[in-house]
Image (spheres, helix red, strand yellow):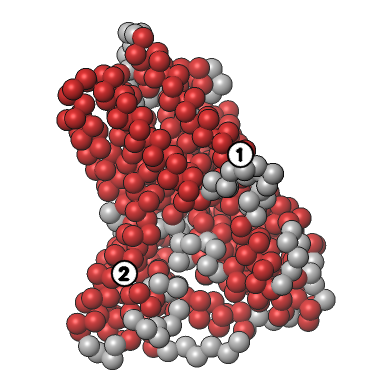
């Protein structure tokens, strides 16, 4: 498909390159993104300042609206844990799990393994909240640095699990429907490639973090949800804190069981996944917060609930405040362009991806790396799924010329889109922000740490994809 690139496209590309350079130099990128939104709004509206100024606000509003559900569930989880900490139930709850996390090295892979399994059944964002509450504080207290914990959860959950999506099959299903393939036609290819990327990336991430793990081993650094829990001082056991140390994990285990049960077609329950799963977890956290506040504070719960909610919201806002302007800029390049710039606005990011696709040479190696690169470009909007129709269509149009498998070419494009935007490489992606928020680390720093392991994994997968063609 022929794409005409306008001045707005070139300005958008320039800002994207500026953002990438700033991230490499470990500088903040909020200002370039806001200025980029204004300049593109100015150019698109032929020099009119008023709609350009309005575009800045609309971009932030669109991004904030899309990210608010993740902000809210993190805020509610932190508020719930604050209430648990006041009771002393938090330390009792995680005490049994400490026996499994014998050292930070085991904790790194155990945390990622549990995240992968949970994310397969009900998608990574709600799984992050669950794993964060149940295991992340234990792993960090076992000596695993917060950043290493975040990398493990993010790479194996929002990367390996989501890019394969082997149970729910939302990602491969979207690619298959776009180009008319039978359901499940891509399953073998995406399973192999997602495992290749995930295993390579997680091993490299572990090797990169070994020095920090050794340095921190034996220290107790409070971060994220760990900071929301009590310290290691001896806890006086009471009927109340023992009861809630059991009730809270049992509640979330029942939620997990319900989600898994509902995922089978033969059940009467509708599948609970994505936003529905997030809503169930957030609602459960709110209910537990209220119950524990009344149990601990009696009629003073009317005030203590507000205190805990305020603490949770402040924690979430602190994490998300710099992310919203960045997300707003990248949303401008995708399907939200109309909501920001007005009717007829082009999808700048996808047009650039299409232009790259049109220049790809027709051989299997170039096709594999080319569709991977196109997928990464489309993933820069922080979605991961929005670029799948483009990578699938590109596979359908180019694969026959090289006598290659359409499924394999589409699968490697899916790896690029989901690993970048689902996400492990973009600091404004929902999954990465949620992981960073729960671990209490900077989304920018997490994206930087992920870069080398994930890019190495994707490069190996691109070579493997050639043999699958």
First-in-chain label (1 vs 2): 2
- For label 1, count other residues whose C-alpha is less than 10 Å away and answer few (under 14), some (14-19) or many (20+): some
For the point 42% across and 89% down, the residue is 6
- Observer-nearest residue: 193 or 246? 246
x, y percent for residue 177 = 67, 68
- Observer-nearest residue: 461 or 296? 296
Q: Mark 1 points at which residue?
A: 260
Q: Mark 2 points at which residue?
A: 59
For the point 27% across and 84% down, the residue is 42
x, y percent for residue 384 = 53, 61
In this rendering, the answer to whether 344 lies above or below 366 is below
- Observer-nearest residue: 44 or 200? 44
User: How many marks do you count on the picture?
Assistant: 2
x, y percent for residue 160 = 61, 49
In this rendering, the answer to whether 356 lies above or below 460 is below
Is residue 372 among what the camera can see?
no
Separation of disc 1 and disc 2 at Cα? 37 Å
State which quadrant residue 238 falls in: top left
Which part of the image, by quadrant, shows the C terminus? bottom right
- For label 2, count other residues whose C-alpha is less than 10 Å away and answer few (under 14), some (14-19) or many (20+): many
For the point 48% across and 62% down, the residue is 383
In this rendering, the answer to whether 431 lies above or below 349 is above
Q: Which mark is residue 211?
A: none
């Amino acid at each position: 498909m022929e794409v005409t690139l306008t001045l707005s496209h070139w300005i958008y590309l320039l800002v994207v390159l500026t953002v990438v350079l700033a991230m490499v130099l470990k500088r903040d990128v909020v200002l370039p993104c806001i200025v980029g939104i204004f300049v593109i709004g100015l150019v698109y509206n032929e020099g009119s300042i008023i709609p350009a100024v309005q575009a800045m606000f609309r971009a932030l509003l669109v991004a904030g609206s899309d990210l608010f559900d993740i902000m809210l569930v993190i805020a509610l989880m932190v508020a719930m844990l604050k209430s648990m900490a006041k009771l002393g139930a938090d330390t009792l709850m995680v005490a049994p799990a400490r026996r499994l996390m014998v050292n930070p090295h085991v904790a790194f892979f155990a945390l990622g393994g549990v995240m992968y399994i949970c994310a397969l059944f009900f998608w990574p964002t709600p799984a992050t909240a669950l794993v964060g509450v149940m295991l992340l504080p234990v792993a960090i207290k076992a000596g695993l640095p917060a950043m290493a914990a975040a990398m493990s959860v993010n790479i194996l959950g929002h990367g390996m699990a989501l890019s394969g999506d082997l149970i729910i099959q939302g990602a491969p299903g979207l690619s298959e429907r776009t180009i008319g393939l039978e359901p499940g036609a891509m399953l073998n290819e995406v399973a192999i490639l997602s495992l290749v990327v995930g295993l390579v990336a997680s091993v490299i991430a572990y090797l990169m973090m070994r020095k920090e793990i050794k340095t921190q081993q034996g220290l107790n650094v409070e971060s994220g949800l760990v900071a929301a829990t009590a310290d290691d001082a001896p806890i006086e056991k009471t009927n109340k804190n023992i009861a809630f140390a059991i009730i809270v994990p049992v509640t979330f285990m029942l939620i997990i069981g319900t989600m898994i049960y509902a995922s089978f077609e033969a059940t009467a329950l509708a599948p609970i996944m994505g936003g529905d799963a997030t809503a169930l977890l957030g609602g459960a956290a709110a209910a537990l917060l209220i119950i524990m506040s009344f149990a601990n504070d009696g009629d003073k719960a009317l005030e203590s609930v507000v205190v805990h909610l305020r603490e949770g919201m402040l924690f979430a806002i602190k994490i998300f405040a710099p992310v919203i302007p960045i997300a707003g800029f990248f949303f401008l390049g995708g399907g939200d362009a109309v909501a920001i710039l007005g009717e007829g606005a082009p999808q700048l990011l996808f047009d650039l991806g299409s232009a790259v696709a049109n220049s790809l040479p027709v051989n299997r190696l170039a096709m594999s790396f080319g569709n991977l690169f196109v997928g990464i470009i489309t993933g820069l909007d922080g979605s991961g799924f929005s670029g799948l129709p483009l990578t699938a269509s590109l596979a359908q149009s180019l694969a026959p010329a090289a006598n290659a498998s359409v499924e394999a070419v589409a699968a490697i494009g899916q790896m690029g889109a989901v690993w970048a935007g689902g996400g492990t490489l973009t600091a404004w992606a929902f999954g990465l922000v949620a992981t960073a928020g729960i671990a209490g680390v900077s989304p920018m720093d997490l994206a930087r740490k992920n870069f080398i392991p994930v890019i190495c994994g994707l490069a190996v997968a691109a070579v493997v994809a050639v043999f699958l063609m």
